[in-house]
Image (spheres, rainbow, N blue to C red):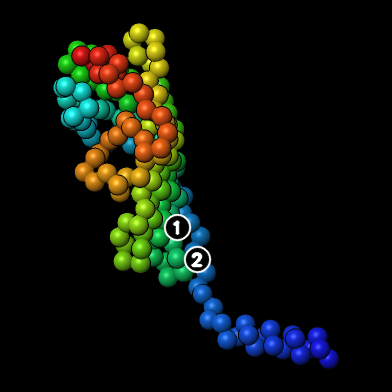
Amino acid sequence: MRRFALAICIALGLLAVPLTAAAKSPTMLRYSQNPPALTLSGVCAFDITIHATVQTTEFDYFDGSGTLTRIYFHATEQDTFTGPGRSLTTVPYTYNFELRFDSSGEFTAFVVSGVILRLQLPDGSLFLSAGRINVLAHPGISFSFVPDLGRSGNLAAFCAALA
């Protein structure tokens, strides 16, 4: 009899708790892109032009009402940096980034993690920056070589190689 009473109490308790709508299945997209050239100032004593090729897998997540709540990207990129003296092309490198949104569509998180840049310099050394960047903490910055957490490559050697 106790088990029956317990089962009735559990059933009534579950009915009293509002059920939440189940989230919709995420969508996946795969694509390649060649974004427009980007001019980067303030890293070296001269401007740098960046041309990129990016292979991306994108996952879009939605809540039960169909509102976009999160986008997750896995990307492999190869860049060509051009300075006044020469151009350098990176080794393809991989990173992830995640965007999260509140119910009104505003960003609540924008985080990049993984390899930020991997480049063999003409002297044979490797420029490698890797880690995590909280993009929302750096408004107005379109490209960063230095992670918030992790390791930064030698920017002086990078600039000297492009000069």
- Closer to the camera in the image, 109 or 64: 109
**Callout 1–callout 2 Cβ contact below 8 Å:** yes
Q: Residue 161 location, x and y as percent?
A: 27, 13
- Position of residue 101 relative to residue 13, above or below, is above
- At x 33%, y 32%, the residue is 146
Mark with earlier residue (1, 2): 2
Residue 18 appears anywhere in the view: yes
Q: Is residue 56 visible?
A: no
- Dot 1: few (<14), some (14–19), or many (≥20) neighbours within 10 Å? some
Q: From the viewer's perspective, is residue 120 above or below residue 141?
A: above
Name the side, left or right, on which 10 lies relative to 144.
Answer: right
For residue 6, what is the image quadrant?
A: bottom right
Q: Residues within 10 Å of mark 2 (few under 14, many from 20)?
A: few
Q: Where residue 161 is drawn, which disc sits there?
A: none
Query: Which x, y percent locates residue 108?
Result: 35, 57
- 21 with respect to 7 (left or right): left
Q: Which residue is mark 1?
A: 61
The x and y percentages for residue 131 are 42, 35
The residue under the point 40% across, 17% down is: 126
Query: Is 25 on the left or on the right of 122, as rendered?
Result: right
Instruction: Name the residue type under label 2.
Output: Ala
Q: Position of residue 110 (x, y in %)?
A: 36, 49
- Alpha-carbon distance for marks 1 and 2? 8 Å
Q: Quadrant of the N terminus?
A: bottom right
Which residue is at a point 35% across and 45% down the rendered structure image? 134
Q: Is residue 38 above or below residue 120?
A: below
Q: In the image, what residue type sits under mark 1?
A: Tyr
The quadrant in which the C terminus is found is top left
Identify the residue position indicated by label 2 in the image: 23
Front-most of residues 74 and 140? 140
SS label for mark 2: loop
Q: How many marks?
A: 2
